Image (cartoon, rainbow, N blue to C red):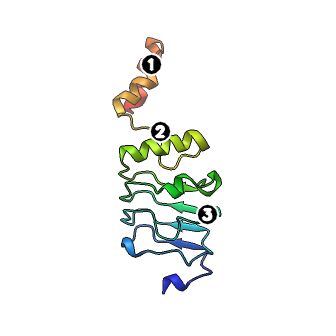
């Protein structure tokens, strides 16, 4: 039934389990696909051979690999794809880093990394005068 919605432009299943039966191949009108936290463990069927720009949110799923078709697509195809917070394999992360170096597009590599709160405090006061360190520590505790 869903696959017959050929003119649908936005599909939002965020937070809903969709399983592996999701096939978007016939839905050629899609411009935005939101599949965040849906339990997907693979790239959705029907999106592998699309070569028009669309927004695709695959964050917070169980995807471990990215198909070669995606990695070989023109950069503008993947410019609005979000893949962060998936348990990607080390090999996939390396492929994504090579893709980023080649195209400038970050599919799954976050711009930031996690730093502990004590380390953040150290970085915040690092290199300041004793008086400034004391002021900032007091401010941190407030």
- Judge the density around disc 1: few (<14), some (14-19), many (≥20) Cα neighbours within 10 Å: few
- Judge the density around disc 2: few (<14), some (14-19), many (≥20) Cα neighbours within 10 Å: few
SS class, disc 2: loop
| Picture quadrant where residue 99 is located | top right
Q: Are marks 1 and 3 in contact (CB under 8 Å)?
A: no
SS class, disc 3: loop
Residue 40 appears left or right of 2:
left
Instruction: From the image, tell me which residue sits under label 1.
Output: 126
| Picture quadrant where residue 36 is located | bottom left
* The residue positioned farthest toward the top in the image shown: 130
Q: Position of residue 31 (x, y in %)?
A: 62, 68
* Picture quarter with the C terminus: top left
Q: Is residue 18 visible?
A: no
Q: Earlier in the sequence, mark 1 or mark 3?
A: 3
Q: Position of residue 135 (x, y in %)?
A: 44, 21
Q: In front: 49, or 57?
A: 49
Q: Position of residue 90 (x, y in %)?
A: 37, 43
Instruction: From the image, tell me which residue sits under label 2.
Output: 112
Residue depicted at x 47% and y 15%? 127
Instruction: From the image, tell me which residue sits under label 3.
Output: 54
SS class, disc 1: loop
């Amino acid at each position: 039934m869903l696959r017959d919605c050929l003119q649908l432009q936005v599909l939002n299943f965020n937070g809903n389990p969709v399983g592996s039966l999701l096939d978007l191949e016939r839905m050629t009108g899609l411009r935005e696909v939101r599949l965040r936290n849906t339990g997907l463990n693979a790239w959705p069927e029907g999106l592998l051979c699309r070569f028009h720009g669309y927004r695709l949110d695959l964050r917070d799923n169980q995807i471990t690999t990215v198909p070669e078709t995606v990695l070989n697509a023109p950069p503008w195809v993947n410019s609005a794809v979000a893949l962060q917070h998936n348990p990607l394999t080390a090999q996939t992360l390396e492929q994504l880093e090579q893709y980023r170096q080649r195209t400038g597009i970050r599919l799954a590599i976050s711009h930031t990394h996690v730093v502990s709160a004590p380390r953040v405090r150290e970085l915040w006061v690092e290199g300041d005068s004793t008086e400034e360190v004391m002021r900032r520590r007091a401010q941190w505790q407030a």
